Structures are given as C-alpha cells and as structure tokens.
Amino acid sequence: MSGLARILAIIAVIVVVVGLVVSGGINTIPTDEEKAKAAWSEVQNQYQRRADLVPNLVETVKGYAKQEEKVLTEVVEARAKATSVKIDASTITDPDKFKQFQEAQQGLSGALGRLIALREAYPDLKSNQNFLSLQSQLEGTENRIAVARKDYIEAVRVFNTDLRTFPQSIYKAIFYSSTKPMETFSAAPENQAAPKVNFN
C-alpha cells in the first residue's frame, strides 16, 4: 500500500508541475525581464541623446558667456562623468552600479540647469536661434527621459513582483534561480524637500 501511495503522490506532483507549465506562466518571468530591459534601453537612449546635445549647447553659450567658464566647465565635466559610467544589462541588477549611474545623470541635470539659467544674464543669448533650438531640444529630451524612466519603473515593478508572487516565485526557484530583482530610480535628494516660496 505504501508503494501505491508513493506512486500516486509522484503522479500528483507530476500533474501539478505539468499543469503549471502548460498554464503558460513559466514564460512570464523571462517575458517581463525582456520588457524591463527594453525599457532600460530606452532610458539609456534618451540619456545619450541629451549627452549628444550638450557639446552644441556649450559651444553656443561660449560665444556669449565668456566669463561663465566655471558653469561651462561644470557642464563639460558632468557630461564626461555621465558618459564615462559604464552601463550594461548588469547595471539594473547591481544597486551600487545603478546608484553611480543615477548620481552621474543627476549631476549632469544640475549642471545643465545652471547653464540654461545663464540666458537670464545675457539678453542676446535669449534671442539666439541656435541657443533657443538647443534649449528646446534639451527640454524635449528631459521630457522623454521622464517618460522613459516612468516606463522603466513600471516594467521593473511588474518584473520584481513576478519574482515574489505565486506561481512565478515557484518558476523562479526551479527554472530561474539566478535571476535577480532589478533596480529602479529614486528621486534626487534635492527633490525630496518641499520648495521654498518667497514673495519678497
């Protein structure tokens, strides 16, 4: 009787495993992982677009703002740092690499903000068509970056949820044990504080 019980138990386990595999959920983890990686590629694409615009913007401003070398130098250095951070598919599963990447991009955002603010000090710069075009392209790129980051955050949420919920957690344990959760963006520290309003 114990031999029959053992055979029935094995058959029951096989039926359950086959049922889970046939249900199609086994492909959920790799499918959502690929979606998150594609979303990450779009984030990288938009950051690269911004980095490509920076030299043109700096050259345009140089002609008007010779005395603003410090700001121009900060932008060039921030761009160099942002583009020197080596990123690949492992970046999104390595918290330290991801933090380094995010900090470099935030540094470039801050430097660009200071550069764009120069237009107030130079009336001729405000009316320069090259500057206005580059500024518009940068603003559009910043919007694209925000959308790409939002899409990436959502794709990572879905993927990381897959790794922790039933039945995908079983598939992870059996078939995808080396799969790690992906990192997501956090707000820059300066964005955590409430803005100060001063009417003086």
Image (cartoon, rainbow, N blue to C red):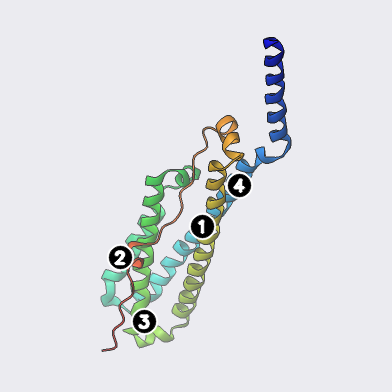
Q: What element carries label 2?
A: helix
> In the visual, does 106 lie left or right of 4?
left
The mark closer to the camera, 1 or 3, is 1
Q: Earlier in the sequence, mark 4 or mark 3?
A: 4
Q: Quadrant of residue 19?
A: top right
Precedes in sequence: disc 1 or disc 4: 4
Marks 4/3: CA–CA distance = 44 Å
Give coordinates of residue 188: x percent, y percent: 36, 62
Is residue 72 placed above or below 184 in the rendered structure? below
Is label 2 or label 1 in front? 1
Residue at 37%, 46% in the rendered image: 96
Residue 6 visible at all: yes
First along the sequence among labels 2 and 3:
2
Read off the residue under disc 3. Answer: 119
Residue 74: mark: 2
- In this rendering, which labeled residue sits more in front, label 4 or label 3? 4
118 or 27: which is nearer to us? 27
Q: Mark 4 points at which residue?
A: 32
Measured as percent of width and height from the top left, residue 29 is found at: 60, 42
Check the image and name the residue furthest to the front.
Answer: 1
Residue 145: x, y in percent? 50, 64
Query: Which quarter of the picture shows residue 30?
Result: top right
Helix, strand, or loop for circle 1?
helix
Q: Rate crowding at label 4 as few (under 14), some (14 to 19) or many (20 or more) other CA atoms within 10 Å.
A: some
Q: Nearer the viewer, residue 135 or 113?
A: 113
Residue 64 appears in the figure: no
Which residue is rendered at x = 44% and y = 56% of the image?
Answer: 185
Quarter of the picture holding the N terminus:
top right
The local secondary structure at tag 3 comes to helix
| Residue marked by disc 1 | 43
Q: How far apart are marks 1 and 3 (CA)?
A: 28 Å
